Image (cartoon, helix red, strand yellow):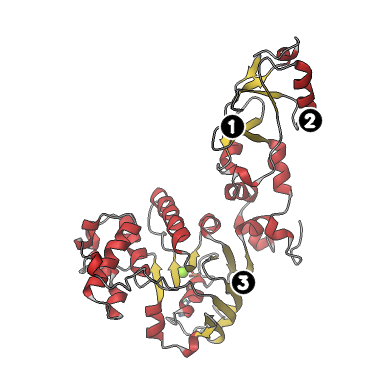
Amino acid sequence: MTTNTADTSGPNANPTPAATLEFRHVQKVYPGSGQPAIQDLSLEICAGEICVLVGPSGCGKTTAMRMVNRMIDLSDGDILLDGRSVRDRAPAELRREIGYAIQQIGLFPHQTIAENITTVPKLLGWSKDRQRARVTELLELIGLDAEMASRYPAQLSGGQRQRVGVARALAADPPLMLMDEPFGAVDPIARARLQNEFLRLQAQLRKTIVFVTHDIDEAIKMGDKIAVLKTGGVLAQYATPAELLMYPADKFVEDFVGADRALKRLALQRVRDIDLWKAALVRVGEPVAQARAKLADADLPIAMLVDAENRPQGWLSDRAFTGERVTAEVRSPAEPVADLDDVLRDALSDLLSTETRYGAVLDARGAMAGVLSLEVIQHFLHAAPAEARSGAELVSE
Ligand code: ADP
Ligand code: MG
């Protein structure tokens, strides 16, 4: 490894802080077109967040994105990168500073993967050692073998090429990344994997990202904030995924997010995010009077038999309470159980298959943390998300 001889100011020695981005009354009218492609677009994107631009084909997503690095010039309004107008910047300089990844990746076919990745570092005049170290680091980051560096794009799978496209966009550690349908060209399974990998990467990198997709599910999964555009480049709503699903601003957004928006909200939440029911936790041999007192205090009418570590053994039947001491008369197994970290939508799906319609929720040690019920989930769906509650301008359904 030559990594140690590379610049000590090496690629990640001093990561570039993420940028803020602001669209201010941006308008775009293509020459010869009577209709604006973007109308009066204003939005603020916080440093380190993924902002997804979503909407039907032709609504202006790509146009909005390309004005940021001035591949397309603004007709009116302004875009501020870290508070500074992109109008005052040389387009070539902006494009070196902003990472850019697109659907048809556009890897150079006659260059190796390493050469593709170092496109911008080369332009920036990085030393050969520093470039090599960056390639090694990025291949590791995106989960490709180091030996891939000397391959050509045609020798890679679609998913691998897509990852290289992301690595190339990340190469010079840009403060902002633009990603235009970056996972659009791969099959659904590879796509889900790329999305998950990218979210893991982003949890580490905390880049500011503008991400374009026409797929609402991808938007909900990837976005910290989502800007829904409608035909004619009109911003229909700019909100968090939960707000969008809970309070679609108009009929267009409501239709666009889909009839299953309640289920989509459940896919955004973990079991630990909701107020679980408290169950009576009862042990064999415990006085029945004491167990009955616990039942009276619980949120559900049946008790869970637990072992010494509060691990669930099964739901007790009434017969367990007939003597003086609780007996091991189990009416149904504790299964299925959910973990606090499970996605609520999956937990609901399991819950629907149980006889009792109650799901034991376990903590990391396998002990009872609470109980999930259909009522708990219903209550959650009708309560406002925390961020939405403070938004006074939001209209309730
Ligand atoms: P999206 O990315 O959401 O599919 P685009 O930003 O590509 O939408 O396009 C928005 C609108 O602008 C469309 O009506 C499209 O036909 C038009 N448009 C895009 N590029 C050009 C261009 N270079 N010249 C004229 N019209 C264009
Ligand atoms: Mg587009």
Amino acid beneath label 1 = Ala
Reading the chain from its start, which is encountered first: label 3 or label 2? 3
Residue at (72% x, 54% y) in the render: 384
Distance in Å between CA atoms under marks 3 and 2: 50 Å
Query: Label 2: which residue?
Result: 297
Q: Pick whichever of labels 1 and 2 is earlier in the sequence.
A: 2
In which image quadrant can residue 175 be found? Answer: bottom left
Residue 311: x %, y % from top left: 59, 27
Residue 373 appears left or right of 184: right
Please, what secondary structure does the residue beneath circle 1 have? loop
Asked whether residue 31 appears in the rendered view, the answer is no
Q: Looking at the image, which residue is at 26% across and 54% down? A: 145
How far apart marks 1 and 3 lie (CA) works out to: 47 Å
The quarter of the picture where residue 125 lies is bottom left
Residue under label 1: 367
Mark number, residue 235: 3
